[in-house]
Image: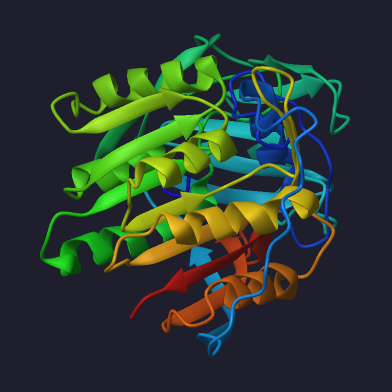
Amino acid sequence: MKPSRDKRRDHRSPRLDTLRVAGSRASEQEARREQARPSAGRNRVVQEVVRRGGPLPGERLPLILEVAPNDDYALLDSGDGRKLEQYGPYRIVRPEGQAIWRPAWPEKEWQRADAIFTGDTDEEGIGRWRFPGTPLGETWPMKHDGIDYLGRFTSFRHVGVFPEQASHWDHMKGLIAAAGRPVRVLNLFGYTGLASLVASAAGAEVTHVDASKKAVQWARENQEAARLTDKPIRWIVEDAQKFAEREARRDNRYDIILLDPPAYGRGPKGEVWQLFENLPAMVELCRSILTARPLAVVLTAYSIRASFFAIHTLMRDVFAGMGGTVESGELVIREKSAGRVLSTSLFSRWVAQ
């Protein structure tokens, strides 16, 4: 299943759900961010970003990237502030604030769920899981496109994967395969590592960075579950922005950079990350650590009160003079029951070709 990383990025192990935004799948990813991961820099100085000259990249928008139901994952039904999902053999019910319509399936179908998130359903609240039938373990096997990994029933309602990211993963696999040369991928705010495993399985050398020790440990366990321990993946527990700054000083470069920051987060030393304040400098850093023949920079934004035009314009401005195209829009999941679409997040990606 594919996406699929402080507050919103709890990165996930134990993380907080936070801001919910229009047009974004905030709750869940936000949770993932805060819960397992700290994110940025205490009293971080907001760096001034000097506008670059040169022509703006081409643009393609709005681009709606859709994940359809498959054997690994399916959004079965949604409505009344909930969503019914299928992860492999398990049916799961979780809150979904954007599902303001009525469910298409009768309640008896929802009652067949194996796990239901209950308790405090507030965006920033901790809840619990109820198992109507046979109790399930905290950790359970899942699969995405032939890659095995581990799901977990966390107290922040997420399970360790964000299926809507599958569209980005497929795109990345295509870029790696078509490159015809070694490709280096940097996964910032990497969460539980699904994107890193996809890139590694496709043949890339991967550096995975997350400020949460729990998230990185979970990612390592996923690497073992996927039988990819022989693949070149560096697992780094570090503040993402500090790591990128150090890579720039070391002159280390990457062909593809995945950037999935939280709306708000804290780093291991109390660093504070505010997306609207810190993102421009972060995107500039990403540009500065690209190779001479870069392939793409992919930015996903959850739980922000903004149009995708905000991050689209930022990406075009930062990549002025680089050529290529900036593609922006929303990540969505197609529902199985009635064919409706659930929007999860905003994205913008610069692609060299």
Quarter of the image for residue 88 reads top left
| Image point (58%, 58%), residue name | 283
Towards the viewer: 70 or 29:
29
Location of residue 160 in the rendering, given as x and y in whole percent from the top left corner: 52, 30
As displayed, is residue 292 above or below residue 88? Answer: below
Image coordinates of residue 175 in percent, x first then y, are 27, 66
Query: What's the image's color scheme?
Result: rainbow
In which quadrant is the C terminus drawn?
bottom left
> Does the image show residue 86?
yes
On screen, residue 181 versus residue 106, left or right, reads left
Give how far across and how far down residue 240 sits, in percent.
55, 36
Is residue 70 depicted above or below 208 in this figure?
below
User: Where is residue 162, by image quadrant?
Assistant: top right
Q: Is residue 190 left or right of residue 146?
A: right
Q: Looking at the picture, tell me which residue is in the foreground, 134 or 272.
A: 272
Residue 100 position in % (x across, y down): 85, 56
